Image: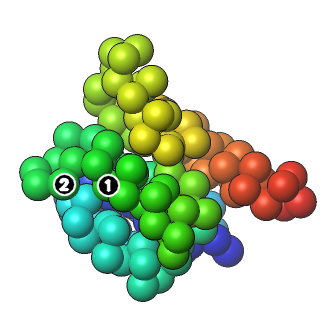
Amino acid sequence: MALVMIVDDSPTQIHIMKKALEKHGFDTVSATSGAECIALAREMRPDRILMDVVMPGVNGFQATRALTRDPCTQSIPVVMVTSKSQETDRIWGLRQGAVDYIVKPVTAAALVAKAHEVLRRSAGGLV
């Protein structure tokens, strides 16, 4: 199955998302910062990235911008999964290159559905 990278500085959030995705057949890898995400994405080339915004150091907006501008990672779809619920935050996330924006708390079912949807979109509807 597809490899999903979960990027969040909260071990609890990583655990919850990892459990939900793996239960539905996804492979997962996690990063606890934007900088770690960028390095791992270049190395592992995940099929999609679920990116928190509020993290120390390189935040999710900065990491998404870096990923979408890097030829090695620009084809990896990034979905922002964050507690930042303002419309301006959503617009800014999409302007940085995210393909979608989900506000926490998110149910396991919604997370898995979004992971499948993004995979279908990135595969041109072939999955």
Q: Position of residue 47 (x, y in %)?
A: 60, 68
Residue at point 10%, 51% (across, down): 56
- Residue 102: x %, y % from top left: 47, 32
Question: How far apart, in angstroms, are the residues tagged by discs 1 and 2?
Answer: 6 Å
User: Residue 63's quadrant in the figure?
Assistant: bottom left
Q: Position of residue 8 (x, y in %)?
A: 27, 53
User: Which residue appears farthest toward the bottom when viewing the image?
Assistant: 43
Q: Residues within 10 Å of mark 1 (few under 14, many from 20)?
A: many
User: Are the residues tagged 1 and 2 within 8 Å (C-beta)?
Assistant: yes
Residue 63 shows which numbered tag? Answer: 1
Q: Residue at x 50, y 43 (%)?
A: 98
**Position of 62 compared to 66: left or right?**
left
- Name the quadrant of the N terminus: bottom right
Task: Point out the tag, 1 or 2, that comes first from the N-terminus.
Answer: 2
Give residue 57's position: percent from left, percent from top.
11, 54
Depth check, front residue: 12 or 34: 34
Say which quadrant the C terminus sits in.
bottom right
Nearer the observer, 26 or 32: 32
Q: Which residue is mark 2?
A: 58
